[in-house]
Amino acid sequence: MEFNPLYLKYLFLAQCFCVSLGIIEGGTKFTRKNQPVTFECPVEKQNFKHWQIDGTVINRIYNTLSIKANVFPNNVSIINITLLENNEQAIVCEITTDKIRFYARPLFNDSGNLYPSFETPNAIKDKKFTLKCKVGGDTRYWYTRNGTIIAKYGGTVDQNKHPKYFGSRQETSCQEKICTLSITSISLDEDNMSIICSSGLHGSMFNITVFVLPKSVTIKNISNTVPVENQNKSYECLIKDTKPEYSVYWLITKNDGTQKNATKYISNKSSKSGKLSTLSSELTLTLNKNFKELQCVAYFPGKSEFVNHSKELDLHIKYSPEDSMILDVSGGKVCVDTPTKFRCSWKGGNPSASVTLEYEKYSNTSKEEVEINVIPSKSHQTVKCRGIHIAANVSREKNLTIHYPPKTIEIKTDEPFLEGRKGILHCKAINGYPEKYSYRWDPSNKTSQNLTLSQLNRTHNNEVYTCYASNKCSKRELHKKHWINVECKLKA
């Protein structure tokens, strides 16, 4: 026979009842009508005599309108009891020195009679938990599932003579129609515990499930790699020490404030320590510059009040500039030996890109936008810009068209110049780029390439005419002088 603590109780109490047979309380078991329940007399076989119900000795089978009983033929110290009515039944095990009395008490009419108070619908570890019971009649009991008395009331008067089952954590009270039992700080010891409220109207049982809220819900980067757009990065949400095991979903908050559920990208692993579970949820995310924050939410399905949010994790996603790199020349043209400004810009990235502009011996570096002032030469016709960013590197080159003024200028004439006739001076600039020039004559201030003197006379002798030529790029004019000598026209 297995060890039974009640046997020790019997050995102790038997010393007090050795003169005549006494009654030892063996305990209570709760059952429902028509459902069998088993009792075992905790004594050695040689000390067992028989079972009794209402004074009748039961050796094998016993049936009445209110009860069915049968003794196990292979072990007469065990008896099965089935209640046929909702009335409690005492069963006595008689041994050589004493009698041990057990009770089979019915659970009946229990729907809605025993329930948590509306303030504490769930038993949460370390929180106060309260049960309320609808009652009737004078005698009201609170029991454990194995029949131990928690509290006893006669009407509204506490009649409990036993130590409080839950010690200093126990609070009880009874009014005319409601009795209350509170555990001020419920623990995991009470998990899966059954508590029975019994009165004249019913016997009702409540099964306690103790919930343990997460010790912490934390979110972190799994690696220290820099978060860069279009790359994959993993994050972990740790939901520590819960009961039962929690579920989790992930939320991405975008820059515009809208949220996206990212749960389909996760994988979960759980571990247990005693009754407590720890859940590790890993999210692998393809980063997008529109993502701002990440958060995981721990919840227990069907219990909307058990929702725990992690802190929001700033993603700080790095992304290359949105704009294309722009490389241009101030004024649109490059003239040799003329101060010129080059500009390069590459904007819109996070963080700002570093931009370097290079031409010949000139170089400058800055954030997003840079410029250099140079004196161009014909031998260097390329300017370069390089952009460096954690997400991407780009470069641009621009082949320059170098403009330069003419090297020489010529003035040709239709000589000889004869008095009374017209004379033409032809001006021509050469070896410049582009080969398109503007001309000006002095002192006539004419702007044509050719200067026509409509009627020559002797007063034109030794006059000096200067031709100025310039192209698109030249700020100074190249000039050529020509002296006019008019020959006399001979008369016949």
Image (cartoon, grey):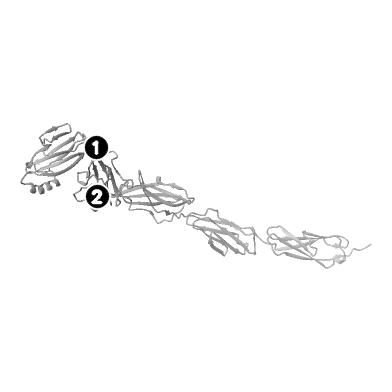
Residue extending farthest to the left is: 19
Quadrant (top left/top right/bottom left/bottom right) for the C terminus: bottom right
Q: Amino acid at mark 1?
A: Phe
The residue under label 2 is 189
Across and down, in percent, residue 162 comes to 18, 49
Residue shown at 25% from the left, 40% from the top: 136
Figure check: 53 above or below 352:
above
Is residue 238 found left or right of 440 in the rendered image? left
Label 1 – label 2 distance at C-alpha: 27 Å
The residue under label 1 is 108
Across and down, in percent, residue 99 comes to 10, 42
Identify which residue, 157 or 21, lies in the foreground.
Answer: 157
Across and down, in percent, residue 453 comes to 83, 61
Residue 120 visible in this rendered orientation of the protein: yes
Query: Going from the N terminus, do you reach mark 1 or mark 2 first?
Result: 1
Residue shown at 85% from the left, 67% from the top: 461
Is residue 342 found left or right of 218 in the rendered image? right
Q: Is label 2 in a helix, a strand or a loop?
A: helix
Is there a contact, CB below 8 Å, between mark 1 and mark 2? no
Q: Where, by quadrant of the figure, is residue 337 drawn?
A: bottom right
Q: Amino acid at mark 2?
A: Asp
